[in-house]
Image (cartoon, rainbow, N blue to C red):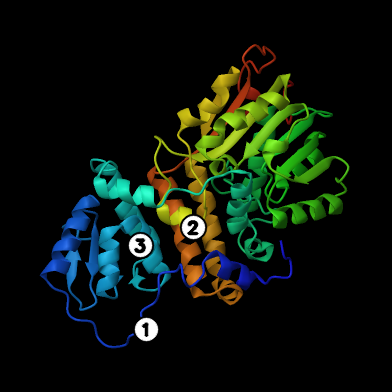
Amino acid sequence: MDTNVSTRERFARIASPQEAEPSRTNDSAPAPSGRLDHWLLTRALAALGHPPLTVVLWDGREISGSASGRNSRLVVRDRPALWRLVWDPWFYFGELYAAGRLEVPDGLEDLLTATYVAHQQRQPTSNSLVRRVLRRARRARRNSLSGSRRNIHHHYDIGNDFYKLWLDEQLVYTCAYFADPAMTLEEAQVAKLDHVCRKLGLQRGQHVLEAGCGWGALALFMARHYGVTVKAFNISHEQIVHARQEAQRQGLSERVQFVEADWRTAGEPCDAFVSVGMLEHVGPENYRELGAAIDRCLKPAGRGLIHSIGQNRPGPTSSWIERRIFPGAYPPALREMVEILEPHDFSVLDVENLRLHYAQTLRHWLERFEQHVGTIGQMFDERFVRIWRLYLSGSMVAFQTGGLQLFQIVFARGDNNRIPWTRAGIYSSDGEVPAW
């Protein structure tokens, strides 16, 4: 990767003007809305489940999705924007909002909550002809060895300085664990790192393999507080550079090895396998290969933990998120995660859902993001600000309303009897972690 390329130029490559939804530059007043506009919009609101939403058209005409007296308001600036929104609201809402052709006067959280809840409560229409055609046309980008590197570069290599503005001090870009809801983000992220270590029952001198290590916080925490050695794999160049610098700064370079390579290249034995926030980028087509990699590396008495965003049932990723934020991403259903383990006779020992913890994490991220929008706008542009505001807000609401889940699965080999008798060790306050 060319490290001399500016952050702004990297984003320009990711979302070039040719791909982006163009802003309207014609200052002449659009023609008044007509019967066809109103009919299409009414049908679209019905298809979304009659959300408590009032759409304000460019000529001031208002169309409401329900008779609720507390409707959120969405302003549509022009007719082409309306027609795109009606054709595919799940994709074009993001495109048009980013371009400034949709405005949300009452804030994104209320509007998205109203829309998500109404849509989840109606009969699913995922098998409609239009939805099937659009889904096929926007098939997720594959996560082959080369494809994964491109997909990860798209999101994680846009500049560490950007992420430092709104993540915690350790740059933990996964769900925090609010053991006490009053915790700060920094406290909750430390609690998450420790929660993972306690579930794994880490003991001094053991070897851990981490698949997808982010900026290195978990690997460094495991080495520093639990006395293990860690080999961590990541294909994000920016993250690996930062992680190695932190390992050197903390005096942990001899105990933590950050490898700029795909998890598929792992092969040495380990006492514990851990993956936090990577499975979303693997793709179901590669789950069998991931299971084989774990089976290849995990010792007979070893144990593993996979932490991933998920869904209650299999379904496609948001087409807009896949295009603009996470190419190749797919949040699996719980049964799809278990299919990684079944072919190798791994036993699932513990499952925890931290959905509301992720909603709280995102609220912290969004607040910090908004505190730095001026700087972020200078680093990139206003369109980038609106894209990421929508991504953070939409994700927060999806976790709040149950559209997304956060699963942690702990597992071991099926014939391994050296497993915890109870969960007490995970929540013990005496600092002791029982050995497996």
The answer to whether one can see residue 226 in this image is yes
Work out whether residue 71 can be spotted.
Answer: no
Which of 42 and 186 lies nearest the eye of the viewer? 42
Q: Nearer the viewer, residue 284 or 171?
A: 284
Circle nearer the viewer, 3 or 2: 3
Relative height, residue 1 to residue 280 (above, below): below
Distance from the alpha carbon under mark 3 to that under mark 2:
15 Å
Q: Is residue 282 above or below residue 50?
A: above
| Dot 3 or dot 1, earlier in sequence | 1
Closer to the eye: label 3 or 1: 1
Q: Which mark is residue 93?
A: 3
Q: Which mark is residue 392?
A: 2
Residue 274 image offset from top left, x and y in percent:
67, 34
Quadrant that contains the N terminus: bottom right
Of the two numbered discs 1 and 2 in the rendering, the one whose residue sits closer to the viewer: 1
Tag shown at residue 9: none
Q: Are marks 1 and 2 in contact (CB under 8 Å)?
A: no
Q: Residue furthest bottom?
A: 28
Q: Is residue 11 above or below residue 257?
A: below
Q: Between disc 3 and disc 2, whose residue precedes? A: 3
Q: Is residue 359 left or right of residue 376?
A: left
Secondary structure type for disc 2: helix
Q: Amino acid at mark 2?
A: Leu
Label 3 residue SS: helix
For this orientation, the residue located farthest to the left is 35
Instruction: Tell me the crowding category of disc 3: few under 14, some 14 to 19, or many 20 or more residues within 10 angstroms, Cα based.
Output: many
Q: Residues within 10 Å of mark 2 (few under 14, many from 20)?
A: some
Quarter where residue 123 is shown: top left
148 or 369: which is nearer to us? 148
Mark 1 residue type = Thr
The disc labelled 3 sits on which kind of residue?
Phe
Q: Which residue is mark 1?
A: 25
